[in-house]
Image: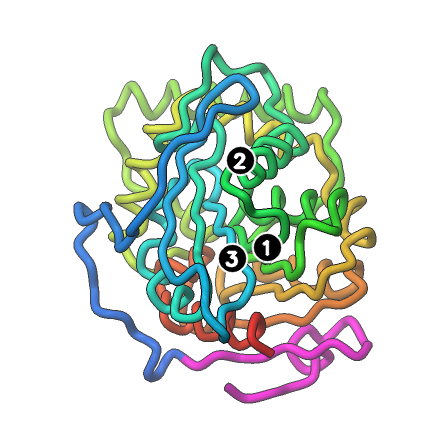
């Protein structure tokens, strides 16, 4: 890794935090077919909490002289545990890794239909309650997209529970009004009707611009995981709009690492995090899109372990 100042990378925010650019060379993991979703996990189960059951999996040692605190991995909006399957073996060398399916996502099944808005604090409380059930009172937390926002709320509201925080390609935005969310709903409904009339559609130019996913397998898998989430996808997305995560950022006490790619819309949020989080630094993974832990798992894991062990 090469070090450069945050001013060089961000061009806007001055301060003491630094950004690290992680080169692509030497960081490619062995390609894994999209249909190989089982992952390397060696443990796990389901935990009843908050009106549903959360699925989790584990990997890595739980004891020993060099074992660090557990690392909790949270997937993206519309994602699932398998999002982390390629990075997990690198992350689990010196600590236990615990990955969750978010409420209503993957194998985490809720008892009833989704509410109009599934709030981020509700999701966070469910994850922490599940960790209580398996005896984890303090851990590092890492999340992508919605998972990152859940981890932020956890670190801000329960600082004694989160030792270090890693935010991977997450939208760090202020709160949206209910009227703005309703307008967004109308646009999504119209777009869905148009797509349904023409059958399955490839990613649009707008989607490619927003997410800049460089690996088509990731796009295919994302379609599978979003279909699995079904109506919970939009309920949780409305929760992201309402939470106003920027209000939580100044309350984060834990050392924080912001991981983004050099492409896609999430890259701009590194500057927001560096400005508002008291103890933050940033990493840029080059040659990747918004889901860097899936596209460049070895390079992403190297940045994460360097931060966790540092």
Q: Return the residue nearer the eye: 21 or 250.
A: 250
Q: Are marks 1 and 2 in contact (CB under 8 Å)?
A: no
Q: Secondary structure at mark 2?
A: helix
> Residue 149, percent across and down?
62, 45
Instruction: Provide the residue designation for mark 2.
Output: 133
Q: Is residue 19 magenta?
A: yes
Q: Return the residue nearer the eye: 34 or 139.
A: 139
Residue 174: which quarter of the image? top right
Horizontal relation, residue 157 to residue 139: left or right: right
Instruction: Provide the residue designation for mark 3.
Output: 71
Disc 2 crowd, CA 10 A, few/some/many (<14, 14-19, 20+): few
Question: In this picture, which residue range is highlighted in magenta?
Answer: 1-23
Q: Residue at x 67, y 71 (%)?
A: 281
Q: Return the residue nearer the eye: 299 or 288.
A: 299
Q: CA distance from mark 3 to mark 1?
A: 6 Å
Disc 3 crowd, CA 10 A, few/some/many (<14, 14-19, 20+): many
Q: Is residue 18 magenta?
A: yes
Q: Residue at x 30, y 21 (%)?
A: 196
Q: Secondary structure at mark 1?
A: strand
Q: CA distance from mark 1 to mark 2?
A: 14 Å
Horizontal relation, residue 226 to residue 110: left or right: left
Q: CA distance from mark 2 to mark 3?
A: 16 Å
Horizontal relation, residue 156 to residue 223: left or right: right
Q: Residue at x 33, y 29 (%)?
A: 227
Instruction: Provide the residue designation for mark 1.
Output: 139
């Amino acid at each position: 890794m090469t070090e450069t100042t945050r001013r060089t990378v961000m061009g806007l925010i001055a301060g003491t935090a630094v950004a690290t650019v992680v080169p692509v060379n030497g960081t490619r993991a062995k390609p894994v077919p999209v249909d190989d979703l089982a992952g390397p996990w060696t443990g796990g189960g389901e935990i009843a909490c908050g009106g549903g059951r959360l699925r989790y999996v584990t990997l890595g040692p739980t004891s020993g002289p060099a074992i660090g605190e557990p690392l909790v991995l949270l997937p993206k909006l519309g994602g699932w545990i398998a999002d982390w399957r390629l990075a997990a073996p690198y992350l689990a060398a010196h600590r236990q890794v615990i990955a969750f399916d978010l409420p209503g996502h993957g194998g985490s099944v809720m008892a009833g239909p989704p509410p109009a808005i599934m709030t981020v604090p509700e999701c966070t409380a469910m994850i922490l309650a599940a960790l209580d059930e398996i005896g984890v009172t303090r851990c590092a937390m890492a999340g992508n997209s919605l998972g990152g926002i859940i981890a932020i709320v956890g670190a801000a509201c329960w600082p004694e529970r989160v030792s270090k925080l890693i935010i991977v390609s997450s939208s760090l935005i202020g709160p949206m009004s209910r009227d703005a969310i309703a307008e967004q709903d109308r646009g999504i409904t119209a777009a869905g009707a148009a797509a349904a009339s023409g059958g399955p559609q490839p990613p649009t130019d707008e989607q490619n611009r927003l997410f800049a996913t460089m690996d088509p397998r990731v796009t295919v898998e994302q379609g599978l995981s979003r279909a699995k989430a079904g109506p919970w996808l939009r309920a949780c997305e409305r929760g992201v709009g309402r939470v106003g995560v920027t209000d939580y950022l100044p309350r984060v006490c834990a050392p924080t690492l912001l991981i983004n790619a050099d492409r896609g819309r999430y890259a701009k949020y590194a500057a927001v995090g560096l400005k508002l989080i008291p103890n933050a630094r940033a990493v840029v993974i080059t040659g990747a899109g918004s889901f860097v832990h899936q596209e460049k798992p070895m390079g992403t894991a190297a940045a994460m372990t360097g931060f966790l062990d540092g």
